[in-house]
Amino acid sequence: MATDSRGSRLLSDLNSAFRRDPDIDEYDFLPVLEPKHNRSPLLLQEHKLGLEMWSVRILYDHAYNTLMAWRQKEAHAKFLDPFDLISLSRAVVLVNADCLTAWNIRKELVESSDLNLLDDLKFGALVLSRHPKSPETFCHRKWLLRRYVECCLSSSNGSTTSTGSLYNDFVNMDAIDFDLEAEANNFLLMENNLHGMNQQTDFHEVMRREMNVCRKAGENYPCNYNAWSHRSWVIQNCYNCTIQVLIGELHVTEAWVRQHISDHSGFHYRQYLLTNIHKQADILKEQFSLNYKNLIHKEMQIVVDLLKSFSGHEAIWYHRRYVFQALCKVCDSEAVAVEIISLPDGYDQDLPIKTSQKKTKLENERQVLLLKEVDSVSRNHMSKKDTFQKGLAQKYLDWVQKSCRS
């Protein structure tokens, strides 16, 4: 009974902390292994919450056992109202972020309007400050964001059909800043009823917050696949891979990968962006007067600069493979475009000769690209004293030659 009593008091202290400061944005467990003073083991200062380590297990056991007894409808389980469910599931998830049952209970509370959707997004960001790689937390955020977007679309268009045209109509792309990670100052939380507010502004604020959550999770845990894949999901499902957002993200993440040169997940995200930009190359040229080939050349220059400044980082070399392969595909696509040109009746008979010459020129460009790449790597990296860097460069050259023969 002593343990149950302490657990109940700890849960009450936790609830009190969130009432006093609803803007808690970080929490952690303090290395205090046994109680030394007759006071609460929870410390709250400047929106940061600390729990003394000795109390964590007691709090978790009390919250988890009470919640599971209610969930399984055991005979001794006491009645829990929505506030109890919110506080108990909060205590469980703060300690064990991958407790799927607790997240499912919170989903049910959101569906019944007992828990504000945006409040739960905010709480999920708090959980990720301590558990930045938690897959269940990111999965729950996807569910919340999907529900939020559908609600906005339904309110704006009178339909929940998530078509590309609806996204484009609802999301005014001209209003999007290229820096999606800009601080969302004076952010106003919506009520459960989303009607009657400036939803377009709120939509962009929520998305900026989401990008910040992904960025912080990526910084707190190196090579955080879950955080970066969630960021890709947001781009695809909340912004419908709109070209302006893709370009904005490409611009924003350049500084990030320059500061995290060993993080393959960041480079892989840029590959995702470039791949989707390539699918919309015509729109890119019409709206921004940008050529996809120029973007790839710029990406190669970024890679070259990083390799000159930081040797021995395998992630950069693997990203170079993607960029070089993208350049080769651009040359191949241009050659195919020339090859399919047909000769209409009445045109100059010298046109096939000119077309053949142009095709040969493009094939030569691909060969020149290969020779330049081999020469650049050999000259800048094979002559270095750093044996590990030379080994990475040799692996890259072997891959280049093999891929070009296939």
Image (cartoon, rainbow, N blue to C red):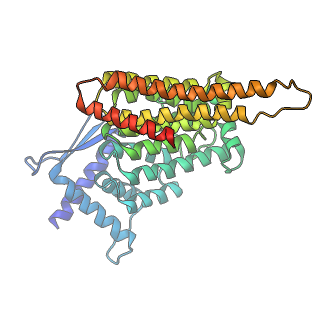
Residue sitting at x 39%, y 42%: 125
- Between 288 and 341, the one lying in front of the other is 341
Residue sitting at x 34%, y 68%: 68
Question: As drawn, is 152 to the left or to the right of 357?
Answer: left
Image quadrant assignment for residue 264: top left
Residue 128, image x, y percentages: 35, 44
**Which corner quadrant holds the N terminus?**
bottom left
Number of labelled discs? Answer: 0
Residue 204, image x, y percentages: 55, 34
Question: As drawn, is 92 to the left or to the right of 137?
Answer: left
Whether residue 266 can be seen here: yes
- Between 320 and 165, the one lying in front of the other is 320
- Between 217 and 86, the one lying in front of the other is 217
Whether residue 123 can be seen here: no
Outermost residue, right side: 346
Residue 287, image x, y percentages: 67, 25
Is residue 6 depicted above or below 129 in this figure?
below
Is residue 36 depicted above or below 341 in this figure?
below
